[in-house]
Image (cartoon, grey):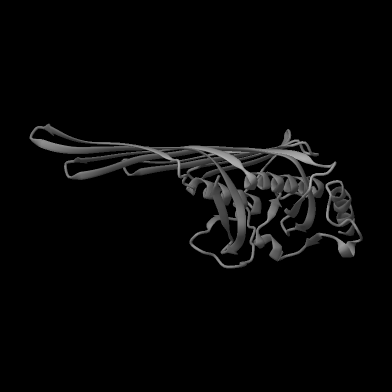
Amino acid sequence: MRNLFIILLLYAGTLNASNTGGQEDSPVTYGEELPSWFFEGGCLGVSDPSSDTIIAYYQAVHRALAFYAIEKDAELASVYEYYYFNAIHHNDDFNNQRSHWIAEFETVADTLSYKVEKIFRTKYNETIVLLNIIDADENAVSVTAKGSFMYHYDSYNKAADYGEKQIMLTQTTDLIKEMLWNSTIDNNKYFKRSYIEEYYSDLKKTMNSYNDYGNTSDEMVFSKCEFGLWNAFVDSFFQALSMFESENIVIENSMRQITNEKDASYNDKSQNIARMVMKTNLSCSLVNLSLKNNCLYANWKIIER
């Protein structure tokens, strides 16, 4: 384990780690319990579970930089569509509905320099880092983060269909040039794939168990930790983003009532179509995290610019 610390510190030194002295001053810790600083917000990054500690370290660092860029300024564009169709036929009530929410975001941050304040290796081989952004120096990097999400829910003749897709792309001028996160849910089928340049790994459901920590509130979004901390972390971010409502939102509604007569039987139908369009700039920052019943709860602060 001491060799692991030394290697991590040597590599962290190339990224302005806050401390590259002996092990007694090392920012690296590991153990059964997640560290308290992980739950206190700040510039956090989480890697996929990986036995390659160096790749996991850089992956966590670059993800932290991506979320720092999102905190500074991100452009968000989204469209929400809702279709409702109600029909009464022979005293049977059919409530059919379809909803789609599609959004994209992008942000660019130039000349970022930072210090790695904390590094933690979980018992499930995840690396967590805490960064401190400092004045730009000769080691500054540029970061581009862009992503999209799509949620859909269809209910037709009492049969329901649900799906979601989340994509997050991070590009840097650092050691790892490009990372891609791809998460898809189709009813009860899951697909979680993480790319580091041309290499990829698929995340599977696990028996990972994290102890409860902190308090939860109704304002917090949450996600199960069954695919690890990163999946829960980024899923909470996408959830918070999907719940945001801009002051500049454009809403279009149309509704009509239809009554048909056939063989002395009257059938009533109603249709309602709603469409919301939004394009704005915002800041999204992590305030704090909690764990309860193996779910990660997150408090994200979103401010429209």
Residue plotted at (50% across, 59% down) = 219
Looking at the rendered image, the quarter that the N terminus falls into is bottom right
Callout count: 0
Against 19, is 102 above or below?
above
Q: Is residue 41 left or right of residue 155?
A: right
From the viewer's perspective, is 172 left or right of 24?
left
Percent coordinates x, y for residue 88 in the rendering? 20, 41
Q: Is 278 situated above or below 116?
A: above
Q: In the figure, residue 176 lies in which quadrant? A: top right
With 6 as the anchor, is 75 left or right in this view?
A: left
User: Which quadrant of the view contains residue 74?
Assistant: top right
Residue at (66% x, 47% y) in the render: 67
Compared with residue 290, is residue 187 higher up or lower down, i.e. above or below?
above
Pinpoint residue 205: horizontal percent, then vertical percent: 61, 50
Image quarter (top left, top right, bottom left or bottom right) of the C terminus: top right
User: Which x, y percent locates residue 240?
Assistant: 53, 50
**Residue 7 visible in the snapshot:** yes
Q: Position of residue 34 (x, y in %)?
A: 70, 63
Question: Is residue 34 visible in this depiction of the protein?
Answer: no
Q: Which residue lies furthest to the left in this view?
A: 264
Residue at the spot x=73%, y=44% of the render? 62
Between 304 and 62, the residue placed more toward the observer is 304
Which residue is at the far right?
22
Q: Which of 146 and 107 is in front in this view?
A: 107
Q: Is residue 81 left or right of residue 7?
A: left
Q: Residue at x 50, y 46 (%)?
A: 242
